[in-house]
Image: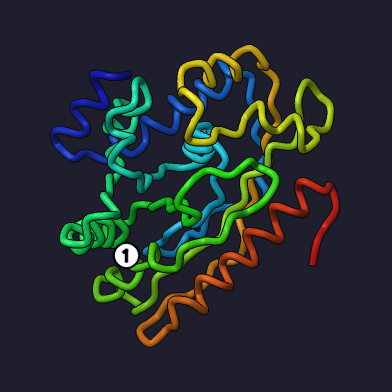
Amino acid sequence: MLPFQLVGLYFDLRLRRVLPRYWHRFACLVLGMKVRVHGRPEVRRPLMLASNHTSWSDILVLSSIDDMVFIAKTEVADWPIFGTLAKLQKSVFVRREEKRSTGDQANDIAERMADGEIVVLFPEGTTSDGNRLLPIKSSLFGAAAMALPLAPEGVVYIQPVAIAYTGLHGMPMGRYHRSIVSWPGDVTLVPHLMGIMRSMALEVDVCFGEPVEYRVGSNRKQVSAKVEAEIRRMLASKLLGREIE
């Protein structure tokens, strides 16, 4: 599969978008991860998915559902294994602390969305413990505003997504067991990967909410608050096992 992906990247073929989905499905199978999908990605474009972030495994889970590209911090490019995979998936690496390069990065993201790619943003800006949603950073939605001039209908769709790790070995996963999958920044990647491989029976629920329209004149903070509320609601519903209004 790797040679075909390299060819797809070199010639910028649609193949480069499709192959990662099948690789990630295989990876989920190998790791024993059962993914349940509720709803579906919005079909209208340009589309940005805004999801909560618990672990590196979120990328495997989401990429197994549809053809997606991720916005990642520059350090990810240097990670063992996953840095190479991120490059092969043509992720967009951003250096948030360097404001001089922010505009170029946002333009790149906007062009990818305008080209029909599904761009995934983790607006918390870091990973959580999987039991809650951290406050999201409205500034990270700047790329949506940059994509507006390229949007045929003058609207960019931002779709809330919740990833909930809900089961382990066929049993409900309590908040204390969620540490098996959650990946805080101070834990080394390879030992964490081995821990998930040893568990080999994770159940994951992925919920796609109603898209929020971002138009010229939209208030970024209001859009961000609406997206955050929906992610929080869907995540809580799956973790608690009952619908939260």
Q: Residue at x 38, y 31 (%)?
A: 20
Q: Residue at x 62, y 51 (%)?
A: 162
Q: Nearer the viewer, residue 231 or 21?
A: 231
> In the image as oriented, which residue stretches furthest toward the bottom?
217
Q: Label 1 is placed on what type of residue?
A: Ala
- In the rendered image, the quadrant that contains the C terminus is bottom right
x and y, in percent, of residue 179 in the image: 67, 31
Q: Is residue 245 above or below residue 2?
A: below
- Residue behind mark 1: 143
Q: Is residue 10 above or below residue 140?
A: above
Q: Residue at x 22, y 56 (%)?
A: 98
Query: Is 167 on the left or on the right of 81, as rendered?
Result: right
Which quadrant of the structure image shows residue 35?
top right
x and y, in percent, of residue 138 in the image: 44, 68
Q: Residue at x 28, y 57 (%)?
A: 109
- In the rendered image, the quadrant that contains the N terminus is top left
Which quadrant of the structure image shows residue 16?
top left
Which quadrant of the structure image shows residue 183?
top right
Q: Nearer the viewer, residue 214 or 43?
A: 214
x and y, in percent, of residue 104 in the image: 17, 59
Query: Is 7 on the left or on the right of 109, as rendered?
Result: left
Q: How many marks?
A: 1
| Residue 14 showing in the rendered view | yes
**What crowding class fits label 1: few (fewer than 14 Cα within 10 Å), some (14-19), or many (20 or more)?**
many
